[in-house]
Amino acid sequence: MDFAYTKEHEMVRDMVRGFAKKEIRPVISDYDREHKYPHIFLSRMAELGIMGICIPERYGGAGMDYISLGIVSEALEWADASVRETIAVHLALNALAVFQWGTEAQKQQFLAPLASGAKVGCFGLTESAAGSDVAAMKSTARRQGDDYILNGEKMWITLADVADTMLVFAKTDPDQRHRGISAFILERGMTGLSTGTIAEKMGVHASNTGWIAMNDVRVPQQNRLGEEGEGFKIAMSALDNARMTVAAGASGTIRAVMELAIAYAQERETFGQKIASYQLVQQMIAKMTLNYDISTMLWQRAAWLKNQGIRNTRETSQAKWFATESAWDAASDAVQIHGAYGFSKEYEVERYLRNAKGAVIYEGTTQIHQLMQASYVLGLRRDKPLRCELPAYDPQLWQED
């Protein structure tokens, strides 16, 4: 693996960092304070090609690779995790799932608008009593002629009140538990489909989080993604993609709070000297730099494997686990370095700390990833080939209209 970025990677990095610095960072605290979703960024991200950064040009994407997706995620979360969440859900969970599992007709109908940013997608897997235990979901999909009738409710869905299309999972055979789950593409405006927003959250206030309710929603058979019973595999493969963006985003949080902590430590004086001269402050900053480098290398390894078309569930899980815990630790230390000011909304580190906690929960809790890693080491878990693997990156195909 070559750790050096290509010229194209550097171009993407500089473009998105510039966007994050000039357009997101100056105003995002206002959106966070008002618990308001920044719709204005959607059109700008579409203009920059971010909404479909790793989707081939023939489907309306930017034709870049999966490392570019990680670069985008890190740069966006450097500004705010709420903005990075849009890409994780819209692109990694929804659009890439359609790209991986969809028929050509589905790609033309659903993927192209998502990749161009003309439409926004979300991912409906979690329910109030079915988070880590996906097989416990209660949502059902009953076959009726050429359609399916969907009933149930999804909870903690990012972009629920923003998305135009929703990749939703329901049981077509409840007796089969996870083997009886199927995936469906729902479109806003379908009769019986409604959404709502969860008003109070600890963090990511500038992101839209809500619920999806399905009351006898009639979904055409051609909107089923994959075969009946493949929903669990589709969901888990989509989570592999999203977890990489979460890990890369967490690296962005570490970089952001590290920069803020360094700047404050070099300005703040106590007992006649800069607090940057104190060894315990230096120790916290040193740990941030170490964990930033490790987190970056872990998500880059996962992205590199994706580029090669190699299954990376274990590597992606490891990256997500380490990076999100490291981001939480770094943000906590940054607040500590700021002292009482870090506990106020006057300084940004407070917002980064609140946001960082969410990432150790969503896309698989830390404890779930610990169990996964132990299962691999103990030989209790082996990844089997999927019927539809995520396509390896091929620049000649990706960048060809």
Image (spheres, grey):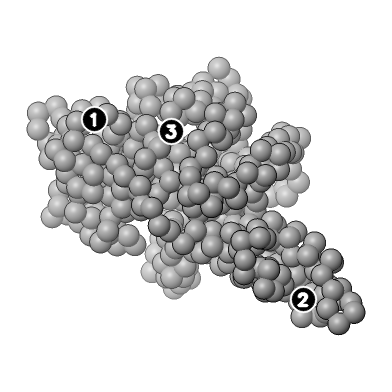
Depth check: 319 or 308 in front?
319
User: Which residue is at 69% across, 56% downward?
Assistant: 256
Residue at label 3? 120
Q: Residue 291 location, x and y as percent?
A: 67, 66
Residue at label 2? 281
Residue at mark 3 to residue at mark 2: CA–CA distance: 43 Å
Circle 3 sits in a helix, a strand or a loop, which is it?
loop
Circle 1 sits in a helix, a strand or a loop, which is it?
loop
User: Which residue is at 20% across, 28% downward?
Assistant: 220
Q: Is residue 70 above or below residue 354?
A: above
Say what amino acid the circle numbered 2 marks. Val
User: Which residue is at 71% across, 39% downward?
Assistant: 22
* Viewport quadrant of the C terminus: top right
Q: Residue 52 location, x and y as percent?
A: 53, 32
N-term-proximal mark, 2 vs 1: 1
Depth check: 230 or 25 in front?
25
Say what amino acid the circle numbered 3 marks. Val
Q: Is residue 290 above or below residue 300?
A: below
Q: Residue 209 location, x and y as percent?
A: 40, 49
N-term-proximal mark, 1 vs 3: 3
Say what amino acid the circle numbered 1 marks. Met
Depth check: 398 or 79 in front?
79
Q: Residues within 10 Å of mark 3 (few under 14, many from 20)?
A: many
N-term-proximal mark, 3 vs 2: 3
Residue at label 1? 190
* Figure quadrant of residue 379: bottom left
Residue at mark 2 to residue at mark 1: CA–CA distance: 55 Å
